[in-house]
């Protein structure tokens, strides 16, 4: 009976609010605008005849970028802070509605004074506030200076991708917040992602990033729901066909005459630096002359890696020294990462790296087998994987390779390299243990 009365009260409050209250966001406080000028976004809260408060939310947009009907900033690439503004708008609207509902449930109505106090907590820069909702927290977390400094550009981009995907789910399926992130959410979200034709690994990456947000919110005592730690709330993952190029294939690329194709030539040289040093594209594509030094007649690279901020020193193979000499004793000029990805496929095709490889992937919840040429599977990260695999197969100690690659455990490293079981067996077959050296065998 108590629940029934409570639900009726909530329903009555919602109906009452819909009649009496009005929350609206406008540009320039509702005044006339012109398209070539930015205007402040204002929130206007009206309740009955006596309360009418307007306040700038401290963001500006051009009129053409504002969707009056949806009360939000339009989804356009050039608006860099679009999602931040829209999260702020949703947050203000939710808090004003909650403020009003709480009063009505206690048999009270908003007054001018109580409404002004509510606005003060929303907009007073001196007031101590912290994000309360999931999307407020995500937006705050990914824009923190310490997070921006300690994460790579790829990680920050992934934060935004996950945020936008969750916002789409929130709009299309179910409203989500800290308190309802449970196994029902997990199953609905995975099913929805599969219906979007996303791959298993892509979905797993979204879940993994959501867990990052939830773990940090839990540590800060903003989130108290620990359902995301349920073993069934797992990161889905399957092994993919990540190829590597062996030393013979790399040599074919190195010897390829690309003098009449400068862009292919530049992409090839940058890629080979990665393949012979183990650097990530964010590092091998941003080298300069100051990274090169000489000691005891040998040339080295000294690099502070962008992702891990670790200093690594790497001896230079003759191929890398030849590339630097070709470019005036310095690394090649930078090229956009995506352009390297595109060009290196053509380079590999020209070098005859056209082995047929069948890849398996779960996409949209279904297993898909696809026939590929090897050159189509080569990308910037293939360079780094090739270095690790080739160094391992040529007898370099995994610990030494990991000093360059940045892998923190040998287990992770061995899973990363692309050597198959036979190649690994051949590598250790020359060990004295398998040769029977220094052992006297006695057959009884």
Image: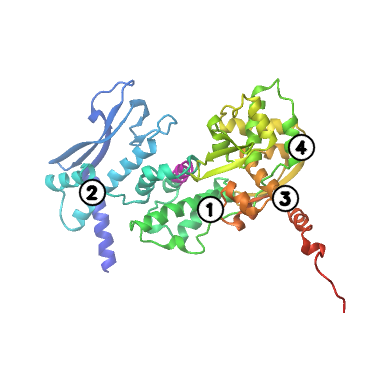
Q: Residues within 10 Å of mark 3 (few under 14, many from 20)?
A: many
- Residue ID for mark 1: 191
Tell which residue pokes out farthest to the bottom in this image: 444
* 351 relative position to 106: left or right: right
* Spatial CA span between label 3 and label 1: 41 Å
Q: Which mark is residue 241?
A: none
Mark earlier in primary sequence (2, 1):
2
| Quarter of the figure with the C terminus | bottom right
* Spatial CA span between label 2 and label 4: 61 Å
Residue 91, horizontal then vertical, whole percent = 31, 45
- Residue ID for mark 3: 393
Q: Could you tell me which secondary element the residue under label 3 belongs to? A: helix
Residue 161 part of the magenta-drawn span:
yes
Magenta region, main secondary structure: helix
- Residue ID for mark 2: 128
Please state the total of marks drawn on the protein image.
4
Q: Which residues are magenta?
A: 156-165
Residue 300, horizontal then vertical, whole percent = 60, 38
Q: Residues within 10 Å of mark 2 (few under 14, many from 20)?
A: few
> Does residue 268 appear in the picture of this structure?
no
| Front tag of 1 and 4 | 4
- Residue ID for mark 4: 354
Mark earlier in primary sequence (3, 1):
1
Q: Could you tell me which secondary element the residue under label 1 belongs to? A: helix
Q: As rendered, which of 404 and 108 lies closer to the eye?
A: 404
């Amino acid at each position: 009976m108590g629940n029934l009365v409570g639900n009726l009260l909530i329903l009555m409050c919602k109906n009452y609010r819909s009649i009496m209250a009005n929350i609206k966001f406008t540009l320039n406080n509702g005044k006339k605008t012109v398209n070539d000028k930015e205007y402040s976004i204002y929130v206007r809260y009206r309740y009955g005849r006596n309360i009418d408060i307007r306040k700038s939310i401290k963001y500006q947009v051009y009129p053409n970028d504002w969707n009056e009907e949806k009360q939000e900033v339009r989804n356009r690439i050039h608006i860099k802070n679009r999602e931040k503004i829209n999260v702020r708008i949703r947050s203000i609207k939710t808090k004003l509605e909650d403020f009003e509902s709480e009063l009505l449930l206690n048999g009270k109505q908003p007054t001018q004074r109580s409404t002004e106090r509510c606005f003060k907590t929303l907009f007073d820069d001196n007031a101590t506030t912290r994000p309360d909702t999931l999307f407020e927290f995500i937006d705050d977390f990914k824009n923190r200076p310490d997070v921006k400094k300690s994460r790579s550009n790829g990680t920050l981009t992934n934060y935004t991708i996950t945020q936008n995907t969750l916002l789409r789910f929130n709009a299309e399926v179910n409203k989500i917040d800290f308190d309802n992130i449970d196994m029902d959410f997990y199953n609905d979200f995975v099913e929805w992602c599969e219906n979007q034709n996303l791959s298993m690994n892509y979905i797993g990456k979204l879940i993994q990033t959501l867990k990052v947000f939830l773990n940090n919110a839990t540590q800060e005592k903003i989130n108290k729901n620990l359902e995301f730690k349920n073993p069934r709330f797992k990161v889905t993952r399957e092994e993919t066909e990540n190829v590597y190029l062996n030393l013979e294939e790399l040599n074919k690329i190195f010897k390829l005459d690309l003098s009449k194709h400068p862009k292919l030539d530049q992409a090839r040289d940058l890629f080979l630096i990665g393949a012979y040093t183990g650097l990530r594209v964010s590092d091998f594509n941003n080298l300069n002359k100051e990274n090169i030094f000489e000691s005891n007649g040998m040339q080295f690279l000294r690099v502070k890696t962008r992702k891990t901020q670790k200093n690594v020193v790497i001896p230079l193979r003759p191929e890398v020294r030849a590339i630097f000499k070709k470019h005036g004793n310095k690394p090649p000029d930078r090229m956009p990462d995506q352009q390297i990805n595109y060009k290196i496929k053509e380079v590999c095709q020209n070098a005859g790296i056209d082995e047929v490889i069948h890849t398996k992937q779960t996409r949209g919840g279904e297993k898909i087998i696809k026939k590929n040429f090897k050159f189509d599977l080569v990308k910037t990260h293939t360079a780094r994987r090739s270095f690790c695999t080739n160094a391992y197969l040529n007898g370099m100690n995994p610990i030494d390779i990991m000093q360059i690659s940045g892998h923190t455990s040998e287990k992770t490293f061995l899973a990363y390299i692309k050597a198959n079981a036979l190649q690994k067996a051949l590598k250790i077959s020359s060990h004295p243990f398998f040769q029977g050296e220094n052992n006297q065998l006695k057959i009884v």
